[in-house]
Image (cartoon, rainbow, N blue to C red):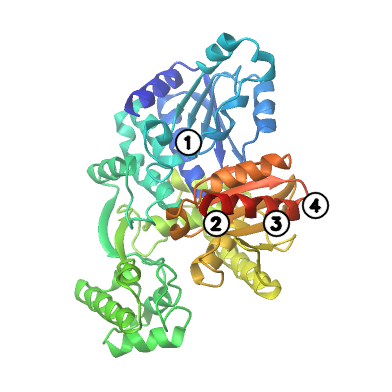
Amino acid sequence: MLERAKQIAARIAHARKVDVYSHIDADGLCAAAIATEALTRAGIDHRIEFLKKLDSGTVESIKNSNPPLVWFVDFGAGQLGSMSGMDVVVTDHHSPAKPAPPKSMRGDLMAFAEAQDEILMLNPHDYGMGSNDASGATCTYAVAREMDRKNIDMAAVAVVGAVADVQESEFRRLKGFNREVIADGESAGVLKATTDLRLFGRETRPIHKFLQYATDPMIPRLTGNEEACTSFLLEIGIDLKADDQWRTWTSLDAGERRRVVSELVTHMLQRGCGWREVERLIGEVYTLVKEEEGSPLRDAKEFGTLLNACGRYDQAEVGMRVCRGDRDENYRRALGLLQNHRETIVSSLNFVDGIGISQMGSIQYFHGEDKIKDTVVGVTAGMLLNSGAASRELPIIAFARAEDGIKVSARASKSLEAKGLDLSVIMREAARRLGGEGGGHVSAAGATIPPGTEEEFLKIVEKLVREQIG
């Protein structure tokens, strides 16, 4: 990995101009920020463009613009076969699709091999690792670090990208190459990794809301019940306010935090939770120590959510500029987008509650039509799965209308992943059979398919799921 990062950095250093293309999710925005900041510091002319997805048609359009050097961040691994004839570097962590020789070169495999020399990719899958061992942002960071060691101050933003891609979820801590990035962040004085309660909202949510919205794990009788959370905290002697201000988790002293954790463990065990559920309360959390206390930018999870609120509402550049240090106009705009995002998610969840979730033998699904934005339908599906509103024993398939067809988002629990389910393979194959394109991660993937093919798509996915896990 280090050697490939050096090769990519060397190629970038000799480029007269670099066109950077990035995905719009939080990991993509962090990767874009790292790439553009590194290029700016190096004095290399560049431009940035954000895309909802990267397909063969988009690659062909980019190729026709005759760019000097293209840098794809947080996508590209699935489109290597259509990049021949371009000078390309890719920093991605998605499962690579095997590049097929283009029709023009199928009779000349040597020409195809030479064309592949123009493509350099840094991807954990090429080094015996998986999608959760590095993110688009941490792969991009590896290249930035090779461009100049001073760029290790961007390690914190890279970790935000990995956390936003829920790479810490399975083991409750980041792993793989991400560990090296954490070490860099700590040595640069921009990041601190500690063991703590790992629920969302450590910096900004009032402590009773912090417990009320817990979904990983769900806490019996507390999750979803504000009154019960308030009573629980008061009964164990935790003051909810200080100087008429709601207290947050990080505003509690160490003794109070230990008391809450101890009582939560007892509470869950007494109500039938197994140890595997209880241990998910605690994990590694990541604090951006130079950010203001109480700010959503100080906690990696909250920072990631703010960035998703930017990218999913066509304001990716706002999020990227926040990653690069803007704490004025763009930060204020990002906070407004975050509030809008929360309201949109509530509306989306209410819509699904009204229409219900349908089931087939091995899958469950819903169609958001034009009532759920295509950029948040995946978030909605994930929240339904994590909250218990959808069965965790079945993968969930979500549809929404998009400008270029029907957007499909698929999500699955870690238990299904452990049984051998790979949604990236299923989405890619099912979409291919219908003339669409798909891919992604093992337990979070997506596709775009032609309108009117949803029913056939579900039948194909149902069959593929059965083939993978029975």
Q: Position of residue 139 (x, y in %)?
A: 41, 36
Left or right: 216 as drawn, with respect to 429? left
- Left/right of residue 270 with respect to residue 67 in the rendered view: left
Q: What type is the residue that disc 1 sits on?
A: Asp
Chain-order first, disc 1 or disc 2: 1
Is 272 on the left-hand or right-hand side of 458? left
Mark 1, residues whose alpha carbon is within 10 Å: few (<14), some, or many (≥20)? many
Percent position (x, y) of residue 247? 35, 76
- Please give the residue where the numbered disc 1 appears in the rendered image: 92
Q: Are marks 3 and 4 in contact (CB under 8 Å)?
A: no
Q: Is residue 33 above or below residue 400?
A: above
Where is the N terminus found, in terms of image quarters?
A: top left
Helix, strand or loop status at disc 2: strand
Residue 242 at least partly seen: no
User: Would you name the residue on which mark 2 appears?
Assistant: 411
Residue drawn at the location 45% of the way across and 21% of the way down: 12
The label shown at residue 400 is 3
Dot 2 amino acid type? Arg
- Between label 3 and label 4, give the one nearer the viewer: 4
What's the CA distance linking mark 1 and mark 4? Answer: 32 Å
List x then y, in percent, for residue 370: 75, 60
Q: CA distance from mark 3 to mark 2?
A: 14 Å
Q: Residue at x 61, y 61 (%)?
A: 363
